[in-house]
Image (cartoon, grey):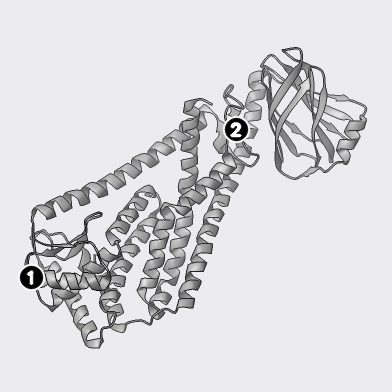
Amino acid sequence: MKQSDHILYLMNLILVLLPSVSAAGSAIFILSKLLADRICRRYEVHVLYTLMRAEVLFFLAPQAMLAAGAAYGRTKPEWGVLEPKGLWTIIGHQSDSGILMIWNPRLTLVRCIVFWIWLAGFLLVFLRRFLREYLAMKKIRAASVAWEDEDIRKICGAFAQELGIRKNIKIYRCSVIASPFSAGLLRPCIFFPSGCMYCEDVRLMLKHELVHCKRKDVLYRFFMMLIRAMHWFNPVISFFERDFAHYSELACDEKVLENAGDFERYGYASLLLAALEEVQEDGTEKYVTGFTGRNEKEAERRMIHIMKGTGKITKPAAAAAAVFFAVYSPAVTYAALQGFYSVDSWIAMKAEDANSVEVEMDLNFTEYTEYQELSEEDILDFDRLRLVGKKAENIDVAISGSEDKNLLSVSLNKGDRVRISLSSENEKDSFKVGLKDENGVCQWNDSKGGLVAHTFITTKKSDYLVVVKGIKAADGKQIKILGNVYIG
């Protein structure tokens, strides 16, 4: 194959992966959404957040690899077996592949347009978001100074030791933010509004942000941003991103209040409410991120969860949830791929129908019928195991200049179609392809330029043989014939 054909093939694989992975990811998220309230009522939100983090990682690696492996296995080309000829060519591929391996200028143009639309959308969504956050962080860092308060350093060190954080977390105060937040993919740090002074409230907010650093939530938010950009065409993923950020905050609240009583929980909820009110009353243009959340509804849900508390999940329940997710996620991915290929196969069948008509017109194929005595080989082939229903069969056979050979036998009903696409290695070879019934009546179609692309339509219910007969080998020895036969 040419290098451009390799590029087109890889582009086609991406067009398979995107809708398949997106559909599977949506199904996984919808399930977690349906279970969210039940989990939050009975167990810690941390359980749900852990599952959502697993979903993010599954989106990025195993799910994409599983889908890519299945897609490649289904449409794997036999490189170099057939080169494109004329308007339509189906490259040698496994029997159950579909429209992806049909090469046609119009289809290729459509696929290229769809791919570039997706790529443009991905770059627009990702770069817009990335640049916006990059410029915001640049402005925040420029307006920040290190918080050198001794009490802050001590309590930060104590919390870091309690949480098992080994990296040195730097604390800054900034004049352009309205609430504290953590940042830094490689060098985690925490920013507080410039008006903050050390007190019990700041101590709680500091621990909240340190939990974010411990769990590498900044990195996961970046992964989520990447997933959102890749699947910009799927609105479900935007809801997933929003819920992921919300449950991240709830899980950190839980960790901060792990052993807290009702009075401490009330104080923490009051702190959250006061921070939100301060942000709304502040008329200056400041960045609102992190601790306060993004809206009043989310803050209300956080305060309700803070006050009621939850029970801890048992190890058997956690193990059962992990096993269920480990089974459910690949199963949904596989189902999404099968759904895509069902549509793909239907499109391929329609395209091959158009292919047959178009090639017959272009190459001036003719069909004729003759009656023959059945040979002993014909009778034996009729008695062998037959193909029943829709089935595609790859053909790779060599015949002498005038030899005839039975390719396969099949039981068909009236009106069934046998689509044949065969070509010889040398376009100067001559051969013909036929469909013979059990009475010896055979419909034939001659090659043109070493190629036969034709659809036979059966006139009665019978057992049939698909046969090929050599007419003349260009080298005087044998004719090498490759292609496929599709029954259905």
**Who is closer to the viewer here, 481 or 273?**
481
Position of residue 169 measured from the top left corner of the image (x, y, whole percent) = 18, 62
Q: Residue 173 lies in what quarter of the image?
A: bottom left
> Measuring 74% from the left and 45% from the top, which residue is drawn there?
389
- Name the residue beneath numbered marker 2: 78
Secondary structure under tag 2 reads loop
Q: Amino acid at mark 2?
A: Glu
x, y percent for residue 459: 81, 35
Q: Does 273 appear above or below 445? A: below
Say above or below: 201 vs 472. Answer: below
The quadrant in which the C terminus is found is top right
Disc 2 and disc 1 in contact, CB within 8 angstroms: no
Mark 1 lies on a secondary structure that is: helix
Which residue appears at 51% of the width and 27% of the height?
A: 105
Left/right placement of residue 435 relative to residue 330 reads right
Q: Is residue 236 visible?
A: no
The vertical placement of 302 against 381, above or below, is below
Amino acid under disc 1: Glu
Q: Position of residue 405 (x, y in %)?
A: 81, 27
Q: Which residue is mark 1?
A: 150
Report the front residue among 300 and 330: 330
Judge left or right: residue 171 versus residue 435: left
- The answer to which of marks 2 and 1 sits earlier in the sequence is 2
Q: Position of residue 338 (x, y in %)?
A: 58, 51
Nearer the observer, disc 2 or disc 1?
1
Crowd tier of the residue under label 1, counting other residues whose Cα lies within 10 Å: few below 14, some 14–19, many 20 or above:
few
* Vertical side of 73 occupied by 43: above or below: below
Mark 2, Cα crowd under 10 Å, few <14 / some 14-19 / many 20+, is: few
